[in-house]
Image: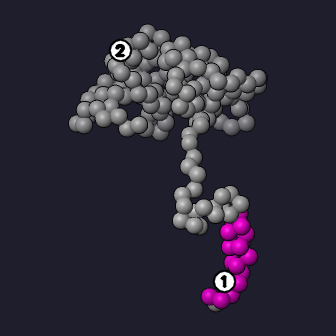
Amino acid sequence: MTSKLIRNLFPALILVFIGLCALGCSGFMKGQSVKKASFEHVAINVKDPAAMADWYCKNLGMKIMFKGDAPGNARFVSDAGGNMMFELYSNTSAAIPDYASQDMLVLHFAFQVENVKETCDKLIESGAKWDKELTKTDSGDEIATLRDPWGIAIQFVKRAKPMI
């Protein structure tokens, strides 16, 4: 039975090996590390990507890197340092979640800031709402979570020891 299983799987294993090598696996086979990946963007399906992108730019200093046309109206929005982007788009062929009804543990955007309270106060004036009030963890991190005007949880952190 084992030899029959090997005979049946052998062609598939060869194809997997060839595919991996074509993708740059040869360095891995020699004991070298494979080229590392870097985050580029996280995509989120929303009702009004243009307005949402504008709010994040106005209130968090983000910048629009790319604007797509209707009907999707995609906006690639980068943090001020150009480290990562959100792709905000609208595609009705997939469900647009009711973000406001989801626990923030299901999805939240987290931003590192110098002053959590000041940032939250400013955003409350700009249409955000409290989700979880400002707390300080045992390790000294300050964390608060708001909801943007579209109901998406946005967390603000000041780490005692920065993670990145």
**Residue 63 image point, x, y percent:** 58, 20
Instruction: For residue 47, say whether it is visible.
Output: no
**Residue 18 image point, x, y percent:** 71, 67
Mainly helix, strand or loop, the magenta region?
A: helix
Q: Is residue 5 above or below residue 17?
A: below
Coloring scheme of the render? one colour
Q: Could you tell me the amino acid type at mark 2?
A: Glu
Instruction: Provide the secondary structure element on which disc 1 rests.
Output: helix
Left or right, 137 with respect to 25, comes to left
Q: Quadrant of residue 48?
A: top right
Which residue does the numbered mark 1 point to in the structure image? 6
Q: Kindly indicate whether the residue at mark 1 contacts the one at mark 2 (C-beta within 8 angstroms).
A: no
Report the Cα–Cα distance between label 2 and label 1.
63 Å
Return the residue nearer the eye: 101 or 33: 33
**Residue 137 image point, x, y percent:** 26, 34
Which residue does the numbered mark 2 point to in the structure image? 118
Q: Quadrant of residue 139?
A: top left
> Which portion, as a residue range, is magenta?
2-19
Determine the residue positioned at 60% across, 25% down: 77
